[in-house]
Image (cartoon, rainbow, N blue to C red):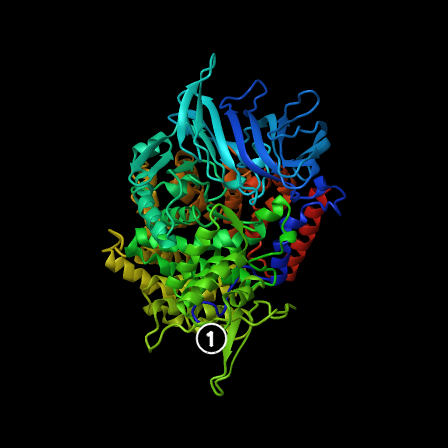
Amino acid sequence: MVRIHFSAMCVGCTFLGMASLATIVGLWTVQLLPSTGTPAEPWNEHRLPDTLVPDYYNITLWPRLQPNIHGLFVFTGNSSVVFKCLRETDLILIHANKLNLTSTDGYVAKLFALGISVAPSIQKTWMQETTQYLVIQLKGKLKAGELYELYTEFVGELADDLAGFYRSEYEENGEKKIVATSQMHPTHARKTFPCFDEPAMRAVFYITLIHDRGTVALSNGMEIADTVLDGQPVTVTTFEPTKNMSSYLLALVVSDYTNVTSANDTLIRIWARKKAIEDGHGDYALNITGPILKFFENYYSVPYPLSKSDQIALPDFYFGAMENWGLVTYRETNLLYDPVISSNANKERTATIIAHELAHMWFGNLVTLKWWNEVWLNEGFASYVSYLGADFAEPSWNVKDLIILKDVHRAFAVDALASSHPLSSKEEDIIKPEQITEQFDTVSYSKGASVLRMLSDFLTEPVFVQGLNTYLNTFAYQNTVGEDLWNHLQTAVDKTGTVLPLSVKEIMDRWVLQMGFPVVIINTTTGQVSQMHFLLDPESSLQRLSPFKQLETNGTGSVIPVINRAQIVDDAFNLARAKIIPVTLALKTTKYLSKERDYMPWQSALNNLDYFYLMFTQTEVYEFLQNYTRKQVTPLFEHFKTITEDWSHVPTGHTDQYNQVNAIRFACSTGVDECQNLTTSWYRQWMDQTNHNPIHPNLRSTVYCSAIASGGADEWDFGWLMFKNAIGIEADKLMSALACAKDTKLLERYLGYTLDASMIRKQDASSVIVYIASNPDGQTLAWDFVRRNWVYMFTEYGVGSFNFASLISGITKTFSTESELEQVRIFYTYTVNTVTS
């Protein structure tokens, strides 16, 4: 019996105007790369052969935090990897990228046998740059079952490229400070030391860091000894060996940071700049980490496997955070919480991201995916249970419901495109580093979370967690494929007597191995139920492998729950965009909004109305849309003015605070005079007294944007000055608001800053460009800027700093005409020809 879940998996939406445009964007990064043709030799393959497997590494690294005589920051190091030979071979392939390997006796490596046999002599060594290998050809064969040790010495650049072992910079009390930190995920460990850099190549890591006295060294394991190096003003820190883990989970940091600590069952340390810790910005993260760890220990029924949990806030970090086992790295804005300047949204983001990363300590680290074609198993799962962990830490927020807006609707947005892709890809289709990086997308995170939420719902949570428990215990310190999880969930189903129409694998394969989701059609006359693949472009020629199963009903009675009110609005707009129902019918679902006070329906409506604003900004429809939205939002604006006693405080409810922001944002953007006067006066008060900001942290992003949009050069210059003097969360708010300017000269200046790392950090450059493109006055400027500077951006910034597919989709999201589509086609051809030539 098929049950229908109208609120969870019926229809979806997208932020791109044309499916054909989305298809081009979806292929962007992969197609930028040159084809290597059919490999003739093993070193031309992007996958390691199955002849060798690492046992453990012994690595010593010395990052120099001052430039050398050539002005370069470098690190030196040596590495020994002990590996086992599984099948006889006369070839060693080990990943190495952008390392200057030291040559001894004409070779860049030394090989030793650890068993009874003698190691064969080295015949030839070289670097295969296209596949990022150190290739070692031997005069004889390694013997199956024997252990060998490979030793290398090397120098690498401690660059500011946000990948591998890299450099982050910040100013404190007028002094420039350097942090040596790392991002090994997904394929950057090879940029730090030669290694078998694939997730299934688990090993134990013995780490030693040499660093300047007065600095602190951190890694995955606990520090066990600090010694001195004769004749050198340095400290040598050794760490306890890691658990058996993948190379991408290794973490290294050298800084002059300090920490706040909690030592109950597990040592918890929050590391950040000294002033941030002194000002208490790490306290919130410290206070919730213990409860979240305890929640996951109970949820998984598996103890936390490490001796400590370090979390560190970094000034320069491309991703939001990284789940390195025992040393989690974060952007500063995602770990630090300042009660004075942080909004409730910032606080929620800190809680959910910490929960996401800590969830990985088990699901992803203890048990790891076999290959990157199933990234969603790591990221979708952590995204789903992050809501559960955050809900445990902050039960009054009711954060679990927000998965609908933040992940389910977001998944619909992408999965309704003809350019979407299945959650699981074929292993042989994901082999190059750039292809691997592109797997970390909305489908893997948001659709993965949505599908797992659905799975937990129809199995029931007790059955779901029972299957997880046996899965984690069975495969601890091993690598798995998706089918392993389905098998353990099926065992839990069988043990509990749960009745399903099909096996767990049969149900989930239809959601995982094929893209998309269904629209369910009910004939109210005959009662007949049917489904079809929902696509925003109904003319797309895609074939569905098999019908979806396990759709559920949700709720009874005449009162529509808040989640369902949000879903009805979202469904209606997307059915209209797919030309299944008239647009006028979709708009009718928003007529009641003048009486709606809950956040979720409003946010759902505004998300969809945002799309119409994108499409109609330059048309005669725009004024009618403005008038309609202003009429609907004015009662909400007045409501919050009343309950906050003329804006003297913020509402008490978590989502009410979000909806207050919505009320002000849309009242100002649709031309409610009282709103515009309010935001301008607050901003002007701040300009008059720069040491006192009267704007509540919740409202700052919206107020800054509104005031800069309605102001001129003075308002923009003040915002820029405040941005340059701000750090963390406040800097992020100002950075996005500066893109709201109407003056194209200001926007052109701001675009230029994105190519100067002293003005805009590399990690933020693509975000600034997309912010400007989201401004109707900046869209053309941003598009022209990217086309003009594409080769420079691709060459200088690379995939460590930019996700180029996301950049292009962000810039072109307002495109809706054949002329604009043709521009994208021409640019696509140009980029492929220029970058790959």
The residue depicted at 71 percent of the width and 45 percent of the height is 34
Q: Mark 1 is on which residue type?
A: Leu
Q: From the top left corner, tell me how far across and down residue 472 is, in percent.
A: 45, 52
| Horizontal side of residue 83 vs 665, given as left or right | right
Taking depth in this image into account, of 553 and 365 the one nearest to the observer is: 365
Q: Which residue is disc 1 drawn over? A: 585
The residue depicted at 49 percent of the width and 31 percent of the height is 206
| Horizontal side of residue 42 vs 295, given as left or right | right
Considering only vertical position in the picture, is 826 above or below 762?
below
Considering only vertical position in the picture, is 804 above or below 412?
above
| Horizontal side of residue 696 vs 542, given as left or right | left
Q: From the top left corner, tell me how far across and down residue 586 is, in percent.
A: 46, 72
Considering only vertical position in the picture, is 822 above or below 728?
below
Q: Give the image quarter of residue 618.
A: bottom right
Q: From the top left corner, tell me how far across and down residue 276 is, in percent.
A: 34, 34
Considering only vertical position in the picture, is 264 above or below 178?
below
Taking depth in this image into account, of 418 and 711 the one nearest to the observer is: 418
Q: From the top left corner, tell me how far across and down residue 243 is, in percent.
A: 46, 39
Is residue 821 in view?
yes
* Residue farthest along the left direction in this orientation: 645
Is residue 672 in view?
no
Q: Number of marks in the image?
A: 1
Q: Residues within 10 Å of mark 1 (few under 14, many from 20)?
A: few
* Residue farthest along the top direction in this orientation: 231
Quadrant placement of the C terminus: top right
In the structure shown, which secondary structural element does the residue marked by tag 1 occupy?
Answer: helix
* Residue farthest along the bottom direction in this orientation: 525
Taking depth in this image into account, of 746 and 186 the one nearest to the observer is: 186
Q: Give the image quarter of residue 176.
A: top left
